[in-house]
Image (cartoon, rainbow, N blue to C red):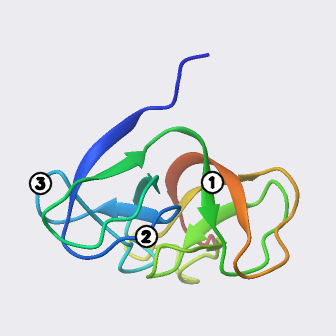
Amino acid sequence: MSAPLVISAKVLSTLSAQRIVAAAASANTVVYPTAAAHLPIGVTLDTVKDTTNAIPVQVNGAAYAYFNDTVAAGALVGSDTNGRAIPFTLAATSTAISAPAAYAGVLWGAAVGATGAIAQILIYPGFDRKGA
């Protein structure tokens, strides 16, 4: 098995360690996901407090993430707008792909039952939508 891939990304604002991030509109830059349809790309490995430094982001494999809600073992993991891991929920009841929801990966290990827990997710971003 190969080692996890870690990239160095620019930031637009303070980002904390163990948070889920998505690509920003600026090249090579990450932000916390801004909406349910903002596709995550990985998990931060460090904290950066200004916009002049880069932040390491793990984009594959198992990474530790900070959870903000209860998530069942093996369940899909989404992100809130602060990069905290939450249970993945579908964005809409429409069958239109215009209302997708993005997830960061799958909870690897035991269920998370408390806000503030740190647990591993297998990074495997994707989209899903509610079917008819």
Measured Cα–Cα span from mark 1 to mark 3: 25 Å
Tag nearer the camera, 3 or 2: 2
For residue 12, above or below residue 55: below
Q: Residue at x 80, y 53 (%)?
A: 74
Q: Amino acid at mark 3?
A: Ala
Q: Quadrant of residue 53?
A: bottom left
Rounded to the nearest angstrom, the CA distance separating label 1 from label 2 is 12 Å
Q: Position of 62 compared to 72: left or right?
A: left
What's the amino acid at mark 1? Tyr
Residue at 56% in and 46% down: 123
| Marks 1,2: beta carbons within 8 A | no
The extreme top residue here reads 1
Horizontal arrangement in the rendering, residue 59 relative to residue 62 (left or right):
left
> Which secondary structure lies at badge 3?
loop
Kindly identify which residue carries mark 2: 16
Residue type of the residue flagged with mark 2: Ser
Q: From the viewer's perspective, is the residue at label 1 or at label 3 nearer? A: 1
Image location of residue 20, percent across then percent down: 48, 63
The number of callouts visible is 3
Residues packed near mark 3 inside 10 Å, few (<14), some (14 to 19) or many (20 plus)? few
Q: Which mark is residue 64?
A: 1
| Position of residue 35 measured from the top left corner of the image (x, y, whole percent) | 40, 80
Q: Indicate the position of residue 87 as horizontal and vertical percent values.
A: 69, 73
Which residue in the protein does label 3 denote? 27
- In primary-sequence order, the first of circles 1 and 2 is 2
Residue 4: numbered disc = none
Camera-nearest residue between 21 and 87: 21
